[in-house]
Amino acid sequence: MLEKIDDTKVFTYFEEISRIPRGSGNNTAISNYLVDFARKHQLEYEQDQQENVIIRKKASKGYENKPTVILQGHMDMVCEKEINCKHDFLTEPLDLQIDGDYVYAKGTTLGGDDGIAVAYALAILDNDTIVHPAIEAVITTDEETGMDGAIGLDVSKLKGTWFINIDSEEEGTILTSCAGGMSVNGTYPLNREEKKGTVIELKVSGLQGGHSGTEIDKNRENAVLLLGRILNELKNEKVEFDIITIDGGLKDNAIPRDAVADVLVTDVEAFEKQFIVVVGNLKKEVAASEPNAEMLCLEKGVQERKVFSKKVKENILLFFQLSPNGVQKMSAAISGLVESSLNLGICRTDEKDLFLSFSIRSSVQSYKQYLGEKMKQLIQLTGGNFEKKSEYPAWEYRADSPLRELCIKVYKEQYGEEPKIEAIHAGLECGILADKNKNLDMVSIGPDIYDIHTPKERLVISSTQRVYQFVLGILKEICEK
C-alpha cells in the first residue's frame, strides 16, 4: 500500500507494524517482531520482562569512538475508533489509506504515535549505507497507559548518553522538557436495586476529543462530563429517573468523544420534554467549540432492570457536578504553556461498580500531588474508592545540552531557519529515563501528526520524509563533529 511513497523503507516498516495489533497491553506480537528483526539482521538485542526491546548496531567504519546515540520510541498505540466502526484491535491489522499528503487508518486511530519512531529506527538499522555512530534503538511498551515499559527499563544497560526521543508531533519543534503525570482511578460500588420502567438511552457523540496533553487547552468538551451535566440538569428540574449504566471514553489520556447512559423513567413525556430544553441550551453553549455535537435520547421499551441505588446515584451525580477537568493552571514561566491539567478519560459500568480513570499532568511536582489529593478527597467524599495507578516525573530543561545545540545546527542547515525550542504539556518517557540516568542529554522530535488519539489521526507524508532526513543529518553530524 505505501511502497509508492517510500524510498527509504520508513513507510515499508510503518506498514509492516500496522499489520500487527499493538494496542497498549497487547505488546507480545510487536515486541517479538522487533526481536525477529534484530535476529534477521544479525544485530545485538535484549528483550526484558516488560517486553521492551533494545537493538544495537555498531558504528559505521571509522566512527567507533563517537558517542553512542539512543533512538527511542514506544511500540504501543491508543486504540480508538469511530462509533460505527467494527474493527477489532486485538486481531485485525489497521486499514491504511493515502489521501494526498496524508496517511490515515480507515475508521480508527493510525498509531503514528508512536509507530513512526519504530519505523524510523528499523529503517536506519536496516540501511548499511548510512553514516552513523553506534546506535541503540530503545522501543518501550505501554507508554500510553502509564509508561510502564519506561518505568521497568533497566537504563544501566544503555551505553549511550545522547538520547533522541521520536515521540513529538510537530515538525520544526525540538522539545526539551515535558510535564510529569499521574493516573488515578475511582471505583463506586453501585448497590443496585430492581425497578421497572421505560428504558431511555442518552447519547453524547460527535465531539472532537483528542490527546489530553496536546489538545487539553483547546476548549474541547468531555463527553462523559457533558452527559453527567445533562443528568444533573434534569435532576435539578425535578425530573425523575434512575441510572442503569454510564459509559464513555477509552483511554485516560484521550478526551472522550462519545458517552452513553441508560436510564429508567416512569414519566417518559416529562423526561423527554425537559431533555429537549436542556440539550437545546447546551448545544448553543458548545456550538463554537463542538459544532458537530449530538445529544440524543432513544426509547428502548418497558423493562425490569437493576439500577443504581438512590444514594449512589446522588453521589455520582454530585461527583460529575464537582469534578475538575481540563486546564487547571497555566505556566507563569513560559507564556502559553499549560502547567497543570486533569482529564476524565474513562467511565465504565459493570454489574457491581462504576469505574472512572483520570490522567493528571503537571510540570510542577507539588501541584501534581495537590491535584491527586484533590481527586482522592472528592472520590472518597462521594462514596468511591480511590487508587493511584501510576506516576511519572517531569523532564526538566537542561541548560547545557550539546545535543540540543547540534540539532539546532543541523536543522538550520537543512531547513534554512531556526527550529522552535519548546516545552510540552504532554508526558514523554524522557522524564522517567532522565530521572534514572542524570547523564542523558535528551531532545524529542517528530514529524507532523494531527489529531492523535482519535480516528481522525493523520501522518503527513512529506513531513515524515523530511524529519527522517533530519535524523540522518544528526547522526552524520555526530560522526563529523
Image (cartoon, rainbow, N blue to C red):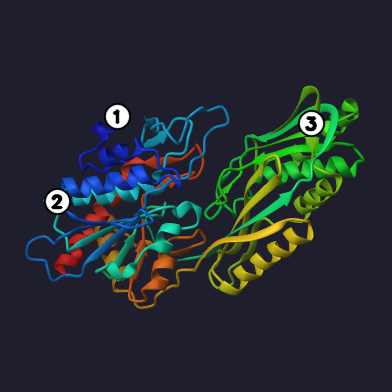
- Give coordinates of residue 243: x percent, y percent: 79, 38
Work out how far the residue at label 3 is from the one at label 1, CA to CA, in angstroms: 49 Å
Measured along the vertical axis of the image, is residue 339 above or below residue 439?
Answer: above
Q: CA distance from mark 3 to mark 2?
A: 61 Å
Tell me the mark number nearer the camera, choosing from 1 and 2. Answer: 2
Dot 1 amino acid type: Met
Q: Name the residue: 46% across, 39% down.
A: 109
Displayed quadrant of residue 347: top right
Q: Which residue is mark 2?
A: 42
Q: Residue 305, which numbered label?
A: 3
The kind of residue tagged 2 is Gln
Dot 2 crowding, Cα within 10 Å, few <14, some 14–19, many 20+:
few
- Residue at the image point whose x is 78% and y is 24% from the top: 299
Residue drawn 52% across the image and 54% down it: 214
Residue at the far top: name it.
301
Classify residue 19 by image quadrant: top left
Q: Position of residue 386 (x, y in %)?
A: 67, 60
Given residues 18 and 173, the one toward you in this image is: 18
| 470 relative to 434, above or below | above
User: Along the polypeptide, which appears first: circle 3 or circle 2?
Assistant: 2
Q: Residues within 10 Å of mark 3 (few under 14, many from 20)?
A: some
| Label 3 or label 1, whichever comes before in sequence order | 1
Q: Residues within 10 Å of mark 1 (few under 14, many from 20)?
A: few
Q: Left or right: where does residue 128 sit relative to residue 393?
A: left
Residue assigned mark 1: 1
Q: Nearer the viewer, residue 106 or 358?
A: 358
> Can you see residue 176?
no
Q: First in sequence, mark 1 or 2: give its number.
A: 1
* Mark 1 residue element: loop
> Helix or strand or loop: what does disc 2 sit on?
loop
Q: Is residue 381 above or below residue 159?
A: above
Viewport quadrant of the C terminus: bottom left
